[in-house]
Image (cartoon, grey):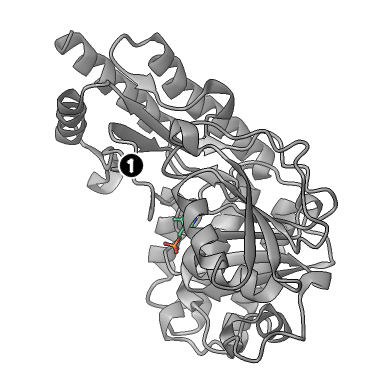
Amino acid sequence: MKYGRVYNFSAGPAMMPESVLEEIRDEMMNYNGSGMCVMEMSHRSKVFQQIAESAEQDLRDLMGIPSNYKVLFIQGGGTLQFAMVPMNLMKNGVACYAETGSWSKKAIAEAKKYGTVHVVASSKDKNYSYIPDCSDLPIPEDTDYFYICENETIHGTTWQALPNTKGHPLVSDQSSMFLSQPCNVSDYGLIYAGVQKNVGPAGMVVAIIREDLIREDLDPHVPIYMSYKTQADNDSMYNTPNCWAIYCCGKVFQYLKRIGGLDEMHRRNLEKAKILYDFLDSSKLFHGSVEKEFRSLMNVPFVTGNAELDAKAVAYTQAAGFENLKGHRSVGGLRASIYNAMPKEGVEALVDCLRKFEAENS
Ligand SMILES: *Cc1c(COP(=O)(O)O)cnc(C)c1O
């Protein structure tokens, strides 16, 4: 690859489109005639305001975000949202959660600090290798929201159909699938995504929230920064935002518009994932660890069934120039994260490498 870059299969932070990195490089010393790098600019300056406004508008265009939703750029990553969601949305102090893996478990543990959490569905019985049926669950009347992690980064599962929330607002953690496919925003009360998986640099989350869920009557102990109302009233600039991340994400939004939007991105992601899953399904050595129907397009965990051979395969791929294929310790084996910016050629080259490993080890 150009610049001696490698195919990086990291679960996050992860690859960004090369053309975007080149644009950022070209604008590094002097952004658009301003005489400054974006990192050096006041967030209140006209030039930065323009960057932030365009980023929001481009995201709105990409996802078709309805006008009764606010788009917020908040710091603290995905993790801060585990607390911000219950702090802001628990009016009755009650929420339903689906437990589909490590990330939803963390969100559940955090929510329990603020109210009653009903874990109404779980796939724990099979080490989170599937998505439980949520089409007709008993949901308490006073539930403030229903929470899911829509793509479990560690376990490699994704929801094929959204849960039936019986009229309650749906909250979705889309961190590891954000902008990977079209999304009907009006199905949700709140979508949030830490951007370092599928969009830009770490340290920022995009939250898309339906306006009627933004409350004024929060517990006075809620930190001012952690109120969605504060963020919305101040256009995400109550304090100094992560200007650099907003700028880089804005570049990626423009890139996605240029290539044909989320339909085209989805087509490419389906094509890439098929290459890897087809290999795993035909391999006698490796197999995917997720039930087929719930396989993620973004995170692909796979194992040989022998920990020593798994470790050997990880070392083999690394020696061949493929980075970060070691699986998460809770699943073991290998994991290839093939987010938006991973080129098809990267997946093809990885499959060639795994095929070679299989031939040498069977
Ligand atoms: C990575 C990740 C998070 C946490 O994001 P941070 O920015 O590290 O806080 C939350 N949810 C999911 C699904 C993730 O993949």
Q: Which of 188 and 51 is in front in this view?
A: 188
Left or right relative to 138: residue 123:
left
Q: Is residue 248 visible?
A: no
Q: Is residue 304 above or below residue 216?
A: above
- In which image quadrant can residue 88 be found? bottom right
Q: Position of residue 33 (x, y in %)?
A: 50, 80
In the picture, which quadrant includes the C terminus? top left
Residue at left 50%, top 22%? 274
- In which image quadrant can residue 358 be found? top left
Q: Which of 246 and 306 is in front in this view?
A: 306
Q: Where is residue 255 in the image (x, y as percent from the top left)?
A: 57, 52
Assess disc 1: are there few (<14), some (14-19) or many (≥20) residues with their C-alpha within 10 Å of its C-alpha.
few
Q: Which of 72 and 199 is in front in this view?
A: 72
Residue type at mark 1 is: Ser
Element at label 1: loop
- Which residue position is annotated with label 1? 330
Q: Which of 254 and 140 is in front in this view?
A: 140
Q: In this view, does 51 lie above or below 159?
A: below
Q: Can residue 69 be seen in this view?
A: yes
Number of disc labels: 1
Q: Position of residue 1 (x, y in %)?
A: 29, 39
Q: Position of residue 39 (x, y in %)?
A: 42, 80
Left or right relative to 236: residue 24:
left
